Amino acid sequence: MDVGLLSQYIMNGLMLGMMYTLVAVGFTLFFGVLDIIKFSHGDVLTVGAFTGLATYIGLRSVGVSSTPLLLLAVLVVAILAMAALGMLIARYLVLPLRSAPALNTLLITLMLGTVLREMVRLFYPQGANPKPFPALLPTDSINLGQFNLRLDNAIMLAAGVTIIVGLRLLLNRTKLGLAIRAVAQDEETARTMGINFTAIVLITFAIGSALAAIGGVMNGLYYNEINFGMGLLLGVIGFSAAIIGGLGSIYGAILGGFLFAALQTIGAVALPFASAYKDVFAFTVVIALMAWRPTGLIQEKISERV
């Protein structure tokens, strides 16, 4: 294999890893503050992507043609809408079930995911069909030797890294982050210290859902297409990434996201009929890793769960 093609595979793996990481970090945040698995997370990503597309179509219909403005509007509306949806889910579905068995929360979020997915399919115009997503980033490319670097990929990858770094700074360097970590470590002690537990949970769900929205828009920009079932596989992959990295660890979620993307890339390169077997290969390795390390590659430390 020539160097240029290998570099292209690596770049594709990095892009996939960034999208998986954004989803996996959301799962980690939810588990960190409430010890729950929110299985509607992938479908929130879908709704975010379709919200961004609807925003684009609406602005274009009223004559807005500035690409930077359209991109900004798509991102802002998708992020704010999914942050609000995440808060609603936490307030009216998750928090009321805190005293119920954990399976109840798992089941209700699983059913909610189906509801969100089917609402997109039924109520979005021709929602059952794949939708073209606009190319809102520069499509130019730079030749670096035998490697052709697309500017849109580079921009999205840099944006993803910035978001993850910003999240770490938020959690480690701000009072809000301290409050989130305090709730994750010990809810009762956090309440005693005057931390508004409900507000912190709502904010955490808003952050996690906003990350899903960014992942959905990024997926649309990368593939130039979205569909109502996209969040189902991305949710499973994001959850798998969080588990193999170590559920409860931000670094574990990052490691798991890029590891899963690396496995898919290796499967695409090394196996025959790559498009058919790469996911099977990746999930098979993940199953083996989970059997070997049930606690994940980075074992959770209770004092550093978020």
Image (cartoon, helix red, strand yellow):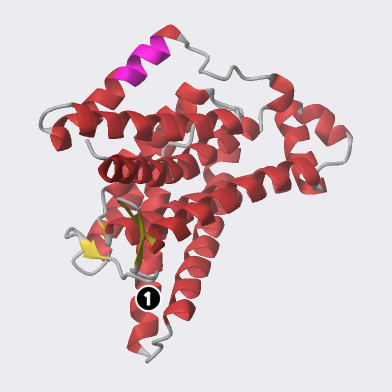
Compared to residue 179, the image places residue 154 above or below, namely: below
Q: Quadrant of residue 55?
A: bottom left
What x and y, as percent, mark residue 126?
A: 18, 66
Residue 221 place in picture, x, y as percent: 35, 61
Please name the amino acid that badge 1 sits on: Tyr
Q: Is residue 128 left or right of residue 81?
A: left
Q: Is residue 255 magenta?
A: no
Residue in the picture at 49% in, 44% down: 22
Q: How many marks?
A: 1
> Which quadrant, please, contains the C terminus?
top right
Determine if residue 10 is in view.
Answer: yes
Residue 144, percent from left and from top:
37, 55
Query: Which residue is at 71% across, 26% downward?
Result: 304
Establish if 245 lies above or below 9.
above
Report the span colored magenta.
Answer: 285-291
What SS does tag 1 mark? helix
On screen, residue 295 versus residue 134, left or right, reads right
**Could you tell me which quadrant the N terminus lies in?**
top left
Q: Residues within 10 Å of mark 1 (few under 14, many from 20)?
A: many
215 above or below 21? below
| Residue 213 seen | no
Q: Which residue does the numbered mark 1 point to in the structure image? A: 56
The quadrant in which residue 62 appears is bottom left
Residue 94 lies, in percent from the top left, at 55, 39
Residue lying at the far top of the rendered structure:
292
Looking at the image, which is closer to me, 140 or 57? 140
The residue shown at (39%, 9%) is 291
Pick the front one: 108 or 249: 249
